[in-house]
Amino acid sequence: MSDYVVDLSDVRREYQTGEVSTVALAGVSLKVARGEFVAIVGPSGSGKSTLMNLIGCLDRPTSGTVKVSGKDISTLDDNELTALRSRAIGFVFQQFQLLPLTSAVENVAAPLLYQGLRPKEATKRAGAMLTRLGLGERLDFDRGRLSGGQQQRVAISRALVTNPDLVLADEPTGALDTSSGAQVMDVFKEMNAEGRTIVLITHDLEVAAAAKRRIYIRDGLIERDDADTKAGAR
Ligand SMILES: Nc1ncnc2c1ncn2[C@@H]1O[C@H](COP(=O)(O)OP(=O)(O)OP(=O)(O)O)[C@@H](O)[C@H]1O
Ligand SMILES: [Mg+2]
């Protein structure tokens, strides 16, 4: 199996709206190895969400190849794609997206139940993950009784609990104040230090500074890649 969790080769994505075609990605090649912590940075409209949807197996390219966890997604049907997504990727979104009227521990246990784990085991693992992220005292709180930063830590626990190959985060600090945002970034740094592969998307350079590698995109193209710079490739 490939050591690259993400391997994009000359990926184009065009959107067709009636007569108008928009080139959102104009030929992007990008490899993310196991254990990397990458920030994808770019201004509004540069193609970040389009890229995230492709890496997250939520969309298919117009041309080029997208491999996630060694699998070429063009060879998978929709059911196989869904299966790959639930096995290989943990998603973290800007707006947390916790289920309403559902406790923290139930939120985190949900993907394990979906994967077929028994409720007792799922609850145990979810509780352990939340405790690791500092929420051991709040397992039974629903989202209405959690701060934004705490809700995002629940969401991160939910993304990590299935032990995915990749954690994919879209503006994870976008809805948080500076100090909760910094705490969330500390959680990502810690998880990466333990070997988790993280790709996060942001327009915030300060947030991007927490990552080990920064990829700048503009007008659907990679403009600069810090890792390349370090390796002396440019
Ligand atoms: N479903 C769609 N249909 C048509 N055009 C789209 C669609 N989604 C995105 N686009 C266009 O593709 C380009 C890239 O959009 P994308 O959403 O990837 O940008 P972004 O970097 O995520 O921006 P933002 O920071 O504002 O979220 C933009 O020009 C956008 O208008
Ligand atoms: Mg976007």
Image (cartoon, rainbow, N blue to C red):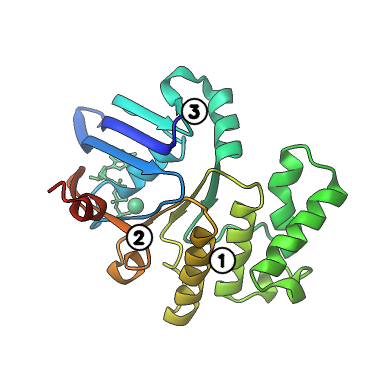
Q: Residue 106: x, y in percent?
A: 76, 57
**What's the residue type where badge 3 is placed?**
Met
Q: Nearer the viewer, mark 2 or mark 1?
A: 2
Q: Residue 166: x, y in percent?
A: 50, 46
Task: Specify whether tag 1 is near ligand 2 (CB below 8 Å).
Answer: no
Residue shown at 43%/24% (left/top)?
Answer: 72
**What's the residue type where badge 1 is placed?**
Gln
Is residue 35 visible in this depiction of the protein? yes
Judge the density around disc 2: few (<14), some (14-19), many (≥20) Cα neighbours within 10 Å.
some
Is residue 62 visible in this depiction of the protein? no
For the residues marked 1 and 3, what is the alpha-carbon distance in whole angstroms? 32 Å
The residue beneath circle 3 is 1
Query: Which numbered marker is on residue 120?
Result: none
Using the image, determine if residue 214 lies above or below residue 58: below
The residue beneath circle 1 is 152
**Residue lying at the far bottom of the rendered structure:** 179
**Residue lying at the far front of the rendered structure:** 231
Q: Earlier in the sequence, mark 2 or mark 3?
A: 3
**Residue lying at the far left of the rendered structure:** 234
Q: Secondary structure at mark 1?
A: helix
The residue beneath circle 2 is 212
**What's the residue type where badge 2 is placed?**
Lys
For the residues marked 2 and 1, what is the alpha-carbon distance in whole angstroms? 21 Å
Q: Secondary structure at mark 2?
A: loop
Q: Nearer the viewer, mark 1 or mark 3?
A: 3
Q: Residue 75: x, y in percent?
A: 45, 18
Judge the density around disc 1: few (<14), some (14-19), many (≥20) Cα neighbours within 10 Å.
many
Viewer-closest of 122 and 226? 226
Using the image, determine if residue 134 lies above or below residue 229: below
